[in-house]
Image (cartoon, grey):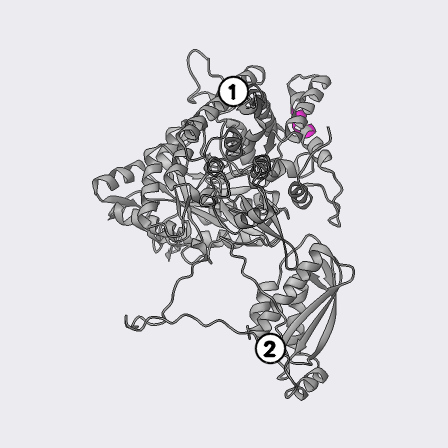
Amino acid sequence: MPLKLSQNALKVLERRYLKKDEQGKVIETPEEMFHRVAQAIAIADKGFGKSAQEVAAQEEAFYRIMTEAQFMPNSPCLMNAGKDLGQLSACFVLPIEDSMDSIFESLKITAQIHKSGGGTGFSFSRLRPKNAVVRTTGGIASGPVSFMRVYDAATEAVKQGGSRRGANMGILRVDHPDIMEFIICKENNKEINNFNISVAITDDFMQKLEKGQEYDLIDPHTHSSVSRLNPKDVFELIVKQAHKNGEPGVIFIDRMNHFNPTPKLGKYESTNPCGEQVLLPYESCDLGSINLLQMCKKVGGRCEIDWERLKEVTRLAVHFLDNLIDVNKFPLSEIEKATKATRKIGLGIMGWASLLIRLGIPYNSEEAVALAEKVMAFVLDEATKKSLELGKTKGTFPAFKGSIYDKKDGAQRVRNATLTTIAPTGTISIIAGPCSSGIEPLFAISYYRNVMDKDKLVEVDPLFEEIAKERGFYSRQLMEKIAENTSIQDMEEVPADVRRIFVTAHDISPEWHVRMQAAFQKYVHNATSKTINFAHDAKIEDVRKAYLLAYKLGCKGITIYRDRSREEQVLNVGSAAATPDKAPQAKKEIAPRPRPEVIIGTTTKVSTGCGNLYVTINVDEEGKPFELFTQMGKAGGCAGSQLEAIGRLVSLGFRSSIEVKSIIEQLRNIRCPSPSWEKGQRIFSCADAIARVIEKRLVNGQVASAAMESAVAMKHSHEDGHAAVDVSDSGDIVGVCPDCGGALRHEEGCQKCHACGFSKC
């Protein structure tokens, strides 16, 4: 059967997953990629006495479930399996002890992991608090938050193998003396942006919160109480900050340790960047997801879950993920040792919302919550059976003795200490798609995608389009109307029963979001990645209720996001003495200067990795920079449009009197896959080349003197009043994708672009 991939899937694969040569040219087809991955994973069976024919059959089975979009492993596996790098794990947790050696050794390992495509989690709870005395030097400790900033800066400097940006989780226990500083460390949205942060909340804290009793703050160095806090004050600050910009999240650390399968190896202290994979120090985990949209069949004109197919795919997926551990090339011997000691895997699902639509079940319904438990219980049961089977033929995980499975009757001799995790599936759900991400509801039913200048393409959820055409209410006008709204619930053009099924994230109350997460969590060994969505006008009290409900219902953590909360800026009124009757005035918009009839400038040729770039900078009658144009030899399509966009935005900055150095700072050192050298300087990208030309012409040497003289002579020339730049507001919830310019949305604890697959956690 020919491989069927959507245009989006092909774009994501070409950009991030398929093999490229030294010039960045794709040299692998999607079919070849899946063969590469299947072969690399199946080969592990050779070491356990399997014949060549048996290994080949296993390879074919792995290839089939991937190409039929029934199962997808995590991104590092698709990127690196069968290649020299060979690092296949997605999640890592590294220890940070209270010493400079430990802090910077873990930082070095972090850079190696990020380069290979993995994400890292840390607990900073062992570091002594800010201003504590360091006896060996007589100095003063700077505290956990200061070292988080060091890790953040290092992450910013390292791209994950050119394919994924570095992602971290920073965790601090609620009883650490610096907890209040930690809670507000991401308050202004401009610091520590390569971290998600979560507070590790203890059962003791929650009990004292309920009783209104103070709790102790413990110095991790001396293990003694240094002060006491009212838990209500701490909890209210957590809730307030989460309402403000979505962070911090919380993890219920004692509950996580209650389900620790190998307590003799140590206690859990941290998770991976999105909070769903809790690990011991130096452990890593490989993840994969079953596409539930492919697990249904038509019976008598309606869809039902194909339980036999789900059983088969679950068992193959467990085999795949277990084999992955054996062929993985770990970045550090300690990581290999810890990972193979417990052989943890994280099998999850995606396409949950898509499956519910196929079944005609509303996401926010009792029926959906009950089915969530049934589906995940089935997956866990079949995964356990397969792990027991592998345990018999290949042996149990080495740390089995003393684990929770170490029973006298020997009936639980599983191969893997943990089996299930529900992880974010941003890019792999695009490859396997179209299907919804993880267990999230639909983020939109119809939306616009910019394809050309002033031209928009309406993208419609394929299931909705299919039903609309079958039921006879499809029209482009209706799809455009839906794209301009976040919900169809008030659109009478859409039948009521269809509206009931096609609910989006903001149609669903936070309580239903939490209940759905809790339903899946009952049958997940590790944890569950899920964003609890709130409307923009949600109150702080609403967030407080969600946090308490998550604890009550047995969730292992919670992450919330209030719509557009990260667009808001802190209002600085300038003086503490400002009186109430003198409210701050709204800042006036900057009006770009109109264009003179004639302007003059220079054109600079720069050699880039994509070809010769010509950058023209023009100045106005006062000699001030006015506009910038770019032209690249044979550029077209995406490259040409991006160059035009940069030129327009820089021109707008010039005409609005934005400081030239600020423009240079924004463009400088932006990297692309095809860097080049120009007169002994490294040119990282076209944007970087433009920044260097601006700096050379306008900061260091100014525009050529002849051009300046001519510009001054034009001072009294006529003005035509036409603006050179057309700027429109994206109206986006989180921001703009740095790769394709599409909409970035907040899902599963990450910023994701559904257009090209970019994600930043």
In the image, is residue 472 above or below residue 262?
A: below
In the image, is residue 459 above or below residue 277?
A: below
Tell me the residue that label 2 is attached to: 594
Residue 687 falls in image quadrant: bottom right
Residue at 64% over, 87% down: 715
Most foreground residue, 319 or 463: 463
Q: In this view, does 590 lie to the left or right of 702?
A: left
Give, as a single range, the part of the protein colored magenta: 39-44
- First in sequence: mark 1 or mark 2? 1
Q: Is residue 444 left or right of residue 136?
A: right
In the image, is residue 573 above or below residue 483?
A: below
Q: Give x and y (percent) for residue 168.
A: 50, 46
Q: Is mark 2 on a helix, strand or loop?
A: loop
Q: Give x and y (percent) for residue 408.
A: 42, 12
For residue 631, say whether it is visible. yes
Residue at 60% over, 37% down: 469
Q: Does the magenta stretch include residue 203?
A: no
